[in-house]
Amino acid sequence: MKQHLSVFGLAVRGTLYKTAALCLAAALAQIGFCLYFLRSGSPDAPLSLEQLIGAPSFARIAGVAFLALCALLCFSGCDRGGTHSIYTLRRLRVSERAAVLWAAVSNAGMLALLWASQLAAVLIIELIRRQFLSAAPDPQTLLIAFYRCRYLHALLPLREISLLVRNLLLLLALALCCAAFSYHQRRGHFRLEPLVLALFVLFFFPQQLGSLESDVTLMLVALAGIAVSGYSLLGGVSDETAS
């Protein structure tokens, strides 16, 4: 078990600091843009939280950060620049497939960190907006915004179980597909599953209340990604014959 925990620790150390820096940069950029819009708006018609989060710049920053994180997770275990991670795994006596699973667990944590940073950015923006308007905090207004704004509703579905399940399945699928990417790259193969899943998330993540059909469709896409990546790992070249 000690060897497995060492592999997990290597996966975390390889991505944690870069992920944290990426999340912080994205959140600061979003807060900065929203602060600019607040200051440039009319005092007689102050912008709501929904208008700030719904601005194209907010979504673009979130999208760029998400794609950058997916790329980071995909290439973190790849052989490049004379580095061969397979040698480390052999010294630790852990199979590559086990290492992929531990990397997937680490990836899920990194994706969850991005989600948490986005949620924190939204809450900070609301606090700044309230300070800017010299208004008292109103939890009801914030709650309504999470129901009416498509991005906020997808970020924190509250009572919509289908959307919550969709998000969890997409997280698991992305975590596994990104982890499996390096496994195949070390064998000279390029897998498209992470890219396809990332594009689905990028374009269809924001969701309005009551979009059950869309939720089910993305659940099926996520399950397909998990199945394809799992099958490719089980049917891949054995660890012993890998170069």
Image: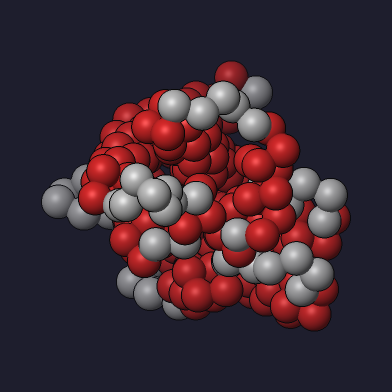
Q: Where is residue 78, by image quadrant? A: bottom left
The residue lying at 84 percent from left, 49 percent from top is 159
30 in relation to 235, above or below: above
13 in relation to 68, above or below: above
Q: Position of residue 116 (x, y in %)?
A: 54, 37
Residue at the far top: name it: 2
In depth, the one of 183 and 43 nearer the eye is 43
Q: Position of residue 39 (x, y in %)?
A: 26, 43
Tell me if 42 is positioned left or right of 150 in this view. left
Does the rendering let one see residue 172?
no
Q: Where is residue 61, by image quadrant? A: bottom left
Tell me if 60 is positioned left or right of 193 in this view. left
The residue lying at 82 percent from left, 62 percent from top is 162
Quarter containing the C terminus: bottom left
Q: Position of residue 129 (x, y in %)?
A: 43, 36
Does the rendering let one see residue 143?
yes
**What colouring style does the render use?**
secondary structure
111 in relation to 199, above or below: above
Quarter containing the N terminus: top right
In depth, the one of 48 and 101 nearer the eye is 48
The residue lying at 65 percent from left, 68 percent from top is 207
In depth, the one of 44 and 64 nearer the eye is 44
Residue at the far front: name it: 44
102 in relation to 181, above or below: above
The residue lying at 39 percent from left, 49 percent from top is 44
Q: Position of residue 74 (x, y in %)?
A: 39, 57
Q: How many marks?
A: 0
Tell me if 166 is positioned left or right of 99 in this view. right
In depth, the one of 19 and 240 nearer the eye is 19
